[in-house]
Amino acid sequence: MLPCGTHCLYTDGSFVKANKNDPGTAGYGVCVVAGGDGLADGDAQAVCEMCGPLHVGLDAVEKLSNNTAELRGVIEALRFARAHGSPAVVKYDSQYAAMITTNVWRAKKNKKLAAVAREEWKRTRAALKGKMWLS
């Protein structure tokens, strides 16, 4: 059971490429809910939704891919959690993004973005005094 007032932040990323000559497009999404228990969010309400595109060369994005989009979603969720100061659980759907963010895995690609994700994780855990989880 999560502490009262915990936000659940659902993250996702996506990459689409029409053909081999297409550079593709990538984007992230985050949905923040409050009022659930962290397991079943039937009683929860969405309090914020965020999404946006990724662009090579901006915000440490070196290449468009599903992995970079997933990392960006986790980064934006962590920034939201830190800015709002309440306990938070980030519910990811990318094991890659979670393991890179928590420094369990070392990035072979996307190293700049991975470094941003790791820094955001450390800063957010410190700001929330450890009341920050991944699930």
Image (cartoon, grey):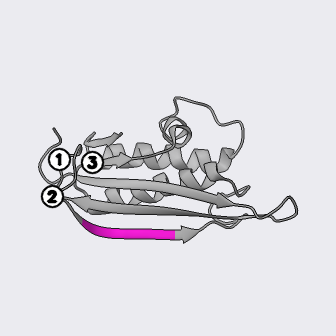
Residue 78 in sight in this render:
no
Q: Earlier in the sequence, mark 3 or mark 2?
A: 2
Q: Is residue 49 magenta?
A: yes
Q: Are marks 1 and 2 in contact (CB under 8 Å)?
A: yes
Q: Earlier in the sequence, mark 1 or mark 3?
A: 1
**What amino acid type should be assigned to the residue bearing mark 3?**
Leu
Residue 105 in sight in this render:
yes
Q: Position of residue 17 (x, y in %)?
A: 74, 61
Q: Position of residue 38 (x, y in %)?
A: 23, 45
**What amino acid type should be assigned to the residue bearing mark 2?**
Asp
Q: What separation in Å lies between label 3 and label 2 (alpha carbons)?
A: 24 Å
Which residue lies most toward the left here? 4
Q: Earlier in the sequence, mark 1 or mark 2?
A: 1
Q: Nearer the viewer, residue 120 or 45?
A: 45
Q: Which residues are magenta?
A: 46-51
Q: What separation in Å lies between label 1 and label 2 (alpha carbons)?
A: 8 Å
Q: Is residue 45 magenta?
A: no
Please give the name of the residue rendered at 42% of the width and 69% of the height, measured from the top-left corner.
50
Q: State the residue position of label 2.
A: 43
Q: Secondary structure at mark 3?
A: loop
Which residue lies most toward the top here? 104
